[in-house]
Image (tube, helix red, strand yellow):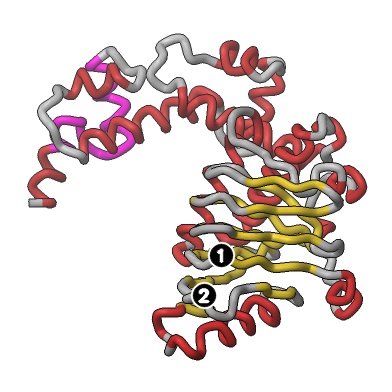
Amino acid sequence: MAVLIRTSDLPAKRRHEAWRSIVCDTLGPLDLRIDPDAPLRGEIEFGKLGDVGVGRIDTSTPHSVHRTSGLIRRENPGLYRVVLALSGSPRLAQDGRQTQLSRGEFAIYDFTRPYELAYDSAVRLAVFSLPHDQLSVPIDAVATLAALPIGAETGAAALAVPLLRRVALDHETYRPGSAARLSTVVTDLVSAAVAERLELTRSLPGDARQRTLLLQVHAFIEQHLGELDLDPATIAAAHHISVRYLHRLFESENTTVAAWIRQRRLERCRTDLLAGGTESVSVVGARWGLPDSAHFSRLFRRAYGMPPAEYRRANTVLTR
């Protein structure tokens, strides 16, 4: 992401004017309201992830931004914005509703209608701009959820929040091809989280619903890799789908459920081995659902070219 403004790079007397220009002209049209005598400290970054705009706002100075009817008449791109509180408690208001977000919560609001986003104290935010036609939920349905908090406790939101956080923090590391794919994942998960909040999940298009379900299955597998009874029947039951449909989901990834589980277990073992430590190879394998040492060693060698103990020794030497 490009740094649009970093107040520490500017003389104090120019900070208010520069911040207003960035907020009102680059991210707007918006109306900035701030105490002209308040010391202004902060940073704004912005970039693109495919069709999705990604921004980070970090400031310790209380102020607010407003999208007014006059500004909407002046320029009115068909966008939703999603704000995720990385720290602090921003306040968002739209359509007569108001919410104060807690860390790890996000909310959606419509850029085509008036709103207010205010900070009474230090905040760090991730803000995403999504074209209306990218979100797989009807506009009138989204309107009923505008400015209401969506937490990360369960369902698609539990996947969306960490993904949004990582995308905002790691945006500049993604290659163009990965960025385009990630933009689809972001819009799918935001769509699914909004639809779940509205109990409209079944209204999602089939492809978006399928991609979201696969992400949920992946997350479930990651959480249960160390359990010996992790198998297609257990996974399917946890997601209220048939085993046959579960296998079809993985066919779209050109793999199988068993192969995916095996790959993820081996990758977790490899990560632990690279971290060093004094644990035996058998303990590492058992931790990630591979308790048979001989079987673990054969699988690891097939995947990485050498047995696990040899792999750890070789990489320990390389990192010294």
Mark 1 and mark 2 residues within 8 Å of each other at the beta carbon: yes
Depth check: 72 or 51 in front? 72
Which of 8 and 13 lies nearest the eye of the viewer? 13
Circle 1 residues within 10 Å: few <14, some 14–19, many ≥20: some
**Quadrant of res 218:** top right
Numbered mark located on residue 62 in the image: 1
- Residue type at the position of mark 2: Ala
- Compared with 284, 26 (above or below) is below
Question: Residue shown at 56%/66% (left/top)?
Answer: 176
In the displayed structure, 286 sits above or below 3; it is: above
Q: Alpha carbon of mark 1 to alpha carbon of mark 2: how far?
A: 8 Å
**Residue that appears at 76% across and 34% down:** 197
Q: Position of residue 228 (x, y in %)?
A: 41, 11
* Image coords of residue 315 (percent x, y): 15, 45
SS assignment at label 1: loop
Name which residue type carries label 1: Pro
The span picked out in magenta is: 293-312
Q: Main secondary structure of the magenta part?
A: helix
Of callouts 1 and 2, the N-terminal one: 2
Which residue matches tag 2?
38
User: Residue at 11% across / 44% down in the picture?
Assistant: 316
* Residue projecting furthest to the front: 37
Q: Secondary structure at mark 2?
A: loop
13 is higher (above) or lower (below) than 243: below
